[in-house]
Image (cartoon, rainbow, N blue to C red):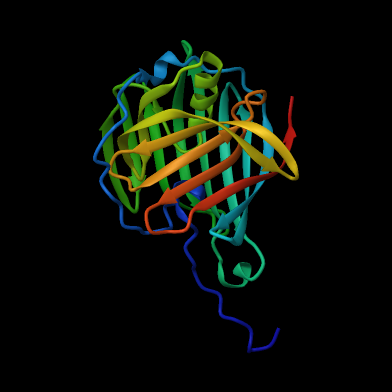
Amino acid sequence: MTSASPTRRSVNFPGPLTPVGYMRPAIRLVIGCWLLALSLPAAAAEPPALRPFSASYDLYRGSLHVAVTELKLQRAGSDWRFSLLTRARGLFAWFVDEQPYAETTFFVADGQVLLREITIGDAATGENHEAASFDWDASRLDVERKGKSRQLELNGGVYDYQSIHVLAASMSRQQLQQATIDFYRKGKLKKANLVYDGEQKVDVNGESIDASVYAQVTSQSGSKMKYFYDPLRPVLPLRVERHEEGESPSVLALREVEWGL
């Protein structure tokens, strides 16, 4: 390659569609109202039977295809682990060094999903930027983020951008319309609502699928998440959208999936 080659530099990926959006600074709007009717605690939604999978997605920012993302659900001993890895594609790969990743390990006890660990970092360098450890016996959450440590009190079940798929599947199976939850985001616990938002057709590689749609609104966040699932194959998202006022939507669109035993 000649000296005229482009200089590689860091470019922010869009929002929490990459691991929890730790790379992307943004102006956050304060949510002024909550959908409280028919709210149910997350613990009321008993988790469905889980099945390992490995799925690949195209990541779009507006009309631009900026990256490919891999989402996996695997067994980790007696636990389960979601892992998310994003790599830039095409011309973006010339300018982006980072490979954002996130891992969420959880277990199921007494019909409730309990997070054990969350790790967020850069697969290209092996550097971790954020780590959270959940001690349910002591009702304590230990967080390391941006070189700072903190402890938070756990008052109930907690979900994040990956384990939220299990909650949506549980709600679908039990026909729950809404759940109010504690949500882990950027080293803090926020209140969030996950609401059933009807049915919508989704195109997956030319196949039209009737998807169940769930919308998430989180306190002190100006963005709204939408998740699309095949009711016959819960937990695996067919599509994930992030909407924020004044910005082009970010979209993960399922490319292919391989199911494990």
Q: Position of residue 162 (x, y in %)?
A: 51, 36
Q: Is residue 90 above or below residue 39?
A: below
Q: Quadrant of the N terminus?
A: bottom right
Q: Position of residue 19 (x, y in %)?
A: 49, 48
| Near-viewer residue (198 or 90) | 198
Is any part of residue 163 visible from this angle?
no
Is any part of residue 227 visible from this angle?
yes
Q: Quadrant of residue 92?
A: bottom right
Q: Residue at x 57, y 35 (%)?
A: 228
| Near-viewer residue (256 or 115) | 256
Q: Quadrant of the C terminus?
A: top right
Q: Quadrant of residue 256?
A: top right
Q: How many marks?
A: 0
Residue furthest bottom as drawn:
3
Residue 34 placement, left or right of 223 = left
Q: Is residue 124 above or below residue 135?
A: below
Residue 103 placement, left or right of 69 = left
Q: Is residue 187 above or below residue 107?
A: below
Q: Position of residue 121 (x, y in %)?
A: 48, 51
Q: Is residue 187 above or below residue 214?
A: below
| Near-viewer residue (210 or 64) | 210
Q: Residue at x 49, y 25 (%)?
A: 167
Q: Position of residue 4 (x, y in %)?
A: 63, 89
